[in-house]
Image (tube, coloured by chain):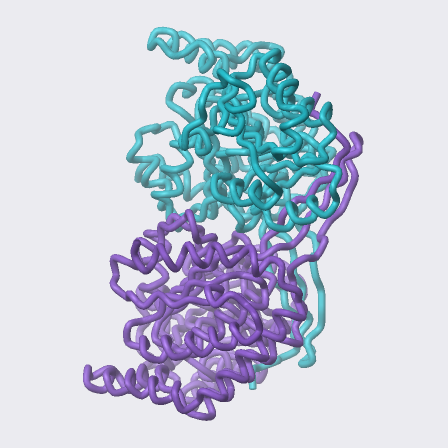
Chain colours: A cyan, B purple
Amino acid sequence: MSELITKAMKAKEATSILNSKSTENKNQALQSIAAQLRKEQAYILEENNKDIKNAQKNGVHVSLIDRLRLNPQRLEEIALAVQQLVALDDPTGKVLATWKRPNGLEMNQVSVPLGVVGMIYEARPNVTVDAASLCLKTGNAVLLRGSSSAIHSNKALVKVIQQGLEHSDFPIDAVQLLEDTRRETATEMFKLKEYLDVLIPRGGKHLIQTVVEQATVPVLETGAGNCHLFIDETADPQMAIDITINAKTQRPSVCNAIETVLIHKQWAAHHFRVFVASLRESGVELRGDEGAQAMVPGLIPAVEADWQTEYLDKILAVKLVNNVDEAITHINKYGTKHSEAIITENQEHVKTFFERVDAAALYHNASTRFTDGFEFGFGAEIGISTQKLHARGPMGLTALTTTKYQINGHGQIKA
Amino acid sequence: MSELITKAMKAKEATSILNSKSTENKNQALQSIAAQLRKEQAYILEENNKDIKNAQKNGVHVSLIDRLRLNPQRLEEIALAVQQLVALDDPTGKVLATWKRPNGLEMNQVSVPLGVVGMIYEARPNVTVDAASLCLKTGNAVLLRGSSSAIHSNKALVKVIQQGLEHSDFPIDAVQLLEDTRRETATEMFKLKEYLDVLIPRGGKHLIQTVVEQATVPVLETGAGNCHLFIDETADPQMAIDITINAKTQRPSVCNAIETVLIHKQWAAHHFRVFVASLRESGVELRGDEGAQAMVPGLIPAVEADWQTEYLDKILAVKLVNNVDEAITHINKYGTKHSEAIITENQEHVKTFFERVDAAALYHNASTRFTDGFEFGFGAEIGISTQKLHARGPMGLTALTTTKYQINGHGQIKA
């Protein structure tokens, strides 16, 4: 049997043991993993260094190498993140609803782990530990499929996690790494409905698209954010500029950063020059539609592609609009249903915007950068869902659970 | 532009109007549709008759023709089902959670329609009206793709539904039928992520498998039920036999009927002969493992395939087991995670069974035939989910909703 099938089978077998573990057991295992990560620091960094050297030899871009690199401080942060899960509420084993039917059947809906989670991700070793500990806290087994460029780091981290599991009497098969990183094996994994209950891809657009296109296992889609900010006629000028700068520049490479600002023509008439100057001062390249160009000569023209692009860079497209309706139409046409904001003092427009814009998170007078499990107060995050099924927006521990109906009778049969 | 793209685009456009309709508006539209279905009875039956004649000409099996056939009574039942939705709670527009963050952000999670539902189904005209009215009640637009063998019935029904929508000032694009029933068009529909938010296939195993394999639009998987009944050592003999007969014979062709009975050896030693006689009296063909054959000579031997088969017929596989653990292992190996029952007086065994069997609905001392939206008290059903994401088990109106976060600030930016 292939490595994939063997490990997936073992993961499925582990689920019934995981089901019987108490919250206290799970918390002990998390503590034990954190301790082991600290104890094996030298070993992990040594293995990580092999990946770094390979990446350098292969001429990988310096920013990607930085993502791959572990050091004592980063490893400590990773261990700390595992420990922080201990304090969070265990979302499994809760009775979510209970009712009695006229025929006497006692109905209970109970929250339970998903089962086996397939995690597919790129060269970030911290995701290995994150995903393993989030799955452990929610009683799920996890089959990890990371990037070949992080294979030494991932093998070391999973080995250390399994040591932690062993010390706390947990099945080591609860957390496994697929060491075979060939593409055709990944494709096989996407279709392994017999053993995997859900796939979570985390990484770039291409990775996620590949999983969505090829998978028959249900997918929790995360990712792309072509986010907008609409500055309405009544927007406070300073607030609008501050939020634009924050949402664009605080971390341009992430999915909840904005890519296009839509500006009401009346607001623009008074404040657009200051707006442009402030953005330029923050190092942002602006690309404007005709209306914007007319107000600030020399602005780089925005073309159709600009409305569609997630720059992930300090570039911002700007379009002038006549009203909130026009803004909503633009957003629903080009947005990726992630995070959308309106800056206004008009409560009617907030209501319209909140009702009619189709997105996971809608903001009034705040930065889109808050779409994040930690900022939402979930304490942890497995990703941000951009689809509408199961979980929408930041996914905390609860997104890693499903439900079961447990029904008690005394011999009821259907008439 | 193709019919598919045109109609999908119109459906998406209709969603923003649907979003602004009140529960009262939606209920009026449902009443108007019911009235129109009654008014146009002659026309609908005439069109349905064309499908029936075609099916007869093509030598379609009589049971399939029966599914296809409408008559005044069936049409009245369909109209009544539409009206019954009026009394049900509208699950959209509810504030599901509300909290405040330390930075002052006011967080609200609100239930909203999914958007555009793609419904793919076989030759049952009642599904056309069912799906349209369930989607309407939940503010969703629906693109229906029925079977070519029901095309006249479906066209007539959708025309009449659209008349009902028009009379109550609803966009007729909220309910549309894809008249192009070519396979390649369906395949294109499965991948129409730009316009469709979810696909719901309803029908046979082959249809559902095709959708799951080819779709990139998220799928709410419904369907297969290889369900089991475990008769434990302490099971009340009469109750065990009554429930077995009910779960097998009350309607053998449905997904929540049982296919295999697992019997504790001690119980079998006392009651197996009576059990066999009772089942045979009810017209059930039994196929037994070696243990069962040893007790009742002449029993048809069960082979590996029997444990895997959803007979959908009056056939039942029987296996003797040593204990509840063996029963659970068998169920988790062969079951389709639909509905599973235990008959026992031992509360510890109920607990073990409920915890360790991986299925949507678990029953103690009751028939599996209750896995159904109406029997659960949901008032309506769009299908029974056999996957773990979004909705598990019977899906009522709530399964046709998703959520949005609406966040109010006063200028918050991320530090």
Q: Quadrant of residue B300?
A: bottom left
**Seen in the image, is A139 located left or right of residue B125?**
right
State whether residue A1 is above or below residue A77.
below
Residue nearer the viewer, B321 or A3: A3
Residue at the image position 39 percent from the left and 87 percent from the top: B43
Residue nearer the viewer, A292 or B220: A292
Residue A51 seen in the figure: yes
The location of residue B289, given as percent across then percent down, is: 36, 70
The location of residue B60, given as percent across then percent down, is: 24, 82
Residue at the image position 42 percent from the left and 36 percent from the top: A208
State whether residue A85 is above or below residue A19.
above
Q: Quadrant of residue B223?
A: bottom left
Residue nearer the viewer, A184 or B157: B157
Residue B242 seen in the figure: no
Residue at the image position 34 percent from the left and 58 percent from the top: B4
The location of residue B321, given as percent across then percent down, is: 47, 65
Residue at the image position 46 percent from the left and 22 percent from the top: A154
State whether residue A183 is above or below residue B183.
above
Q: Quadrant of residue B288?
A: bottom left
